Amino acid sequence: MSYEAKDDQQSGPAVEQQFLQARRLEAMDRLMAGLAEEFNHVHTAILSLAEFVAAAASTGAPHRADLDEIARQAARGTQLARHLLALSAEPPVGRRPESPNAIIHNLEPQIRESLGGSVRLEIARSPSAMSVVVDPLAFELIVLELTRHAARQIGRGSVSIATGPCAVESSDATRPVGLPPGTYFRMTIQARAAGAPPVAESGSPDLALALAETAAAKLNAFLTARVAGRGELSWSLYVPAALAEGGSVGQSVVGDDPLGETILVVEDEAPVRDVICRVLKARGYNVLPAKNGEDALAVASRYGAPIHLVVSDIVMPEMDGAVLFDHLRAWYPTLRFILISGYTRGALRAEQLTDVITEFLPKPFGMDELVEAVDSMLARAAA
């Protein structure tokens, strides 16, 4: 950012004030990310343990409904923490090629639940196998918050989601102001009221819309709004497209029969480490726990058989996951990693995140997500 100094006596204090404001914003960003990271640890343990207990209880067991509700609310808290991190990370750690249609499909039950019984949901996904390079958590946040905002604007009626490729030409008279020409993935969310829409409170901010706009800015996407008439509104999100090769993006091959491979689990938070080890042992894997990077190196050096996969936290005391990654890769160049964390600003280099035999699993996560990531990584190794 550049500043034009017309008066040294005026421009000096002004620039200094802008610098101080930027520092305050950065500090707030770090604070939000740090708090979300702590929530991650708590939610990962609560969600996984609730799933364990609910899975062990029979359908008609006393308090089964309460257990299911605990798991559901923990999952909701998990999603909130993830979305906080998606907004705070710069750049988004999880940015990768994704299928927007697949993300929307997976979110459909949550969207319907959030809309309630008075707003009908309609989804028209393009069959085009198109991918976009996004942080999936930030894209999820945009979909959920925009549909929630749309329902709040109409009270009763319908909300529709339409997706598809969009070619924007410089000569196009309908091109939104400020949108550069190019090929985009476009998602349009339209709200139609049945009857008179509710009267909005004057000057009241809408958190859902603010969150969606912030997430769109993080993705370098373009968000527009249009009011067609009283009770009819629409929002369009334009994301630069990367055409998918070889079919849809985001599908994984999950092995059905674990072969007893050995997994090194490195996590400094004992409750989280215990849950991860418990889940993987129940799946049939041989698990080696370690409390930090230095402990992991000692465990790996003492273990006299092959280690097939490392599941490691990134932000840890004494030796973090990035340094451990470098040490173990020097010993075992083809060793596969699943790096887990909620907040990784500056903790990883770009090549560590884009390594073809490395996956990133954001905290907090449930048992199914962990097992799917591990099974998928080891299945690809065996292929």
Image (spheres, rainbow, N blue to C red):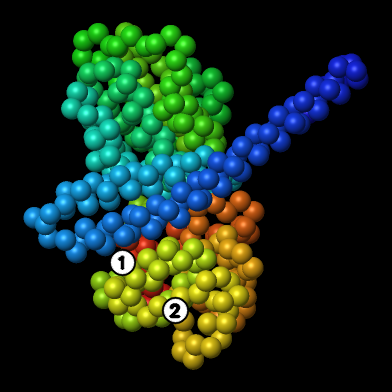
Q: Is residue 242 visible?
A: no
Amino acid type at circle 2 is Leu
Q: Earlier in the sequence, mark 1 or mark 2?
A: 1
Going 22% across and 29% down the picture, which residue do you hit? Answer: 116
Q: Nearer the viewer, residue 93 or 37?
A: 37
Q: Quadrant of the N terminus?
A: top right
Going 30% across and 77% down the picture, which residue do you hit? Answer: 284
Q: Quadrant of the C terminus?
A: bottom left
- Residue density around tag 1, few if under 14, some if 14–19, many if 20 or more, within 10 Å: some
The mark found on residue 339 in the picture is: none
Mark 1 to mark 2: distance in Å?
Answer: 22 Å
Amino acid type at circle 1 is Val
Percent coordinates x, y for residue 3 in the rendering: 80, 25
The mark found on residue 288 in the picture is: 2
**To which quarter of the image does residue 217 belong?**
top right
Q: Nearer the viewer, residue 139 or 298?
A: 298
Mark 1 lies on a secondary structure that is loop
Q: Nearer the viewer, residue 293 or 110?
A: 293
Residue sitting at the far bottom: 304
Q: Nearer the viewer, residue 371 or 122?
A: 371
Percent coordinates x, y for residue 331 in the rendering: 59, 82
Q: Determine whether, in the image, residue 118 is placed left or right of residue 347.
A: left
Q: Which residue is mark 1?
A: 254
- Residue density around tag 2, few if under 14, some if 14–19, many if 20 or more, within 10 Å: some
Mark 2 lies on a secondary structure that is strand
Going 22% across and 18% down the picture, which residue do you hit? Answer: 156
Q: Determine whether, in the image, residue 306 is placed left or right of residue 62.
A: right
Going 50% across and 46% down the picture, which residue do you hit? Answer: 36
Residue sitting at the far left: 60
Percent coordinates x, y for residue 123 in the rendering: 25, 34
Q: Determine whether, in the image, residue 46 is placed left or right of residue 40.
A: left
